[in-house]
Amino acid sequence: MITLGIDLSSMPKATAACLINWHDERAEVQPPILRCTDDKLDTLISQANAIGIDAPFGWPRAFVEAVASWQLSAWSSDIRKRLQFRETDLHVQRETGIWPLSVTSNFIALPAMRAMALLQRHGVTDRSGDGRFFEVYPAGSLHCWKMRSRGYKRIDEACAGFRQGILKELRVALPWLEVSETYADSSDSLDALVASLTVRAAVQGSTGAPNPTQRKVVCFEGWIHLPTNFPTVT
């Protein structure tokens, strides 16, 4: 199996990808692929069995309905929350204590638009995880694996040390993982690595699934796959 993790930004210069070849006793991580254009991502996707993308797969249903035909005449904290966050965002906050960025009112909205174009190109209609394409959240994955999940994204010496520490922890937890130190060079590369590991866990059934009530909306809104365990080579 080959998994592909994509840390998707709105522009190629901050978009990174990670391919992992899974064997019976080891996992071989190819060097990080940086500055990924849409054409490059499409080529990588054609090589992979499962793809984990760090970007929202949709918008809150209430937001889409409100924008399509605005009829709200009142405003409240409850209305604001329903327009800001998806069902999966609320689930992630309950499970990890971390609020994902709002796809409707934060800069993550632009990567979401690029993600929607990518999903459209590849015929994805079920955004909850169709068996090949999965929405992932690297910071949430690291939290679930009880590793550092905050403070590693800035560009300074301390954060570089944090990323090196995360990479070391991954090697300890997954001793069969063959991975280059270059994955600690930037948060884009590290997030792509974690995305590729998470999608392996998703394929193995080791991520949390939506309950029947949630499934009614997450096929449209998207579902963040939080790992319940580490991926394995078997």
Image: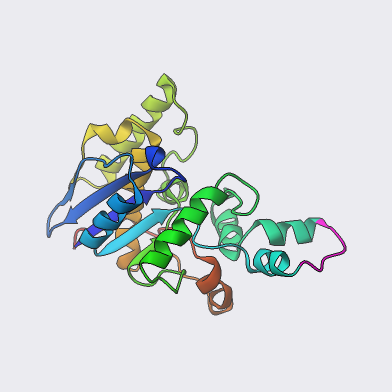
**Residue located 46% across and 54% down the image:** 114
Image coordinates of residue 98 in percent, x first then y, are: 57, 48
4 in relation to 9, above or below: below
- Percent of width and height locating residue 151: 49, 32
Left or right? Give the position of 26 relative to 51. Answer: left
Image quarter of the N terminus:
bottom left
Q: Give the range drawn in magenta.
A: 70-76
Which image quadrant for residue 182? Answer: top left
Is residue 72 left or right of 172 when viewed as pictured? Answer: right
Picture residue at 44% right of the left edge, 22% below the top: 156
Q: Decide which of 16, 139 is in the foreground and name it.
A: 16
* Most foreground residue, 155 or 9: 9
Q: Which residue lies furthest to the top in this view?
A: 157
Percent from the top left, x then y, of residue 130?
Answer: 38, 72
Whether 74 is among the magenta residues is yes
Residue 61 vs 27, above or below: the answer is: below
Identified at 61% across, 51% down, the residue is 102
Q: Give the residue displayed 24% in from the left and 47% down from the top.
A: 174
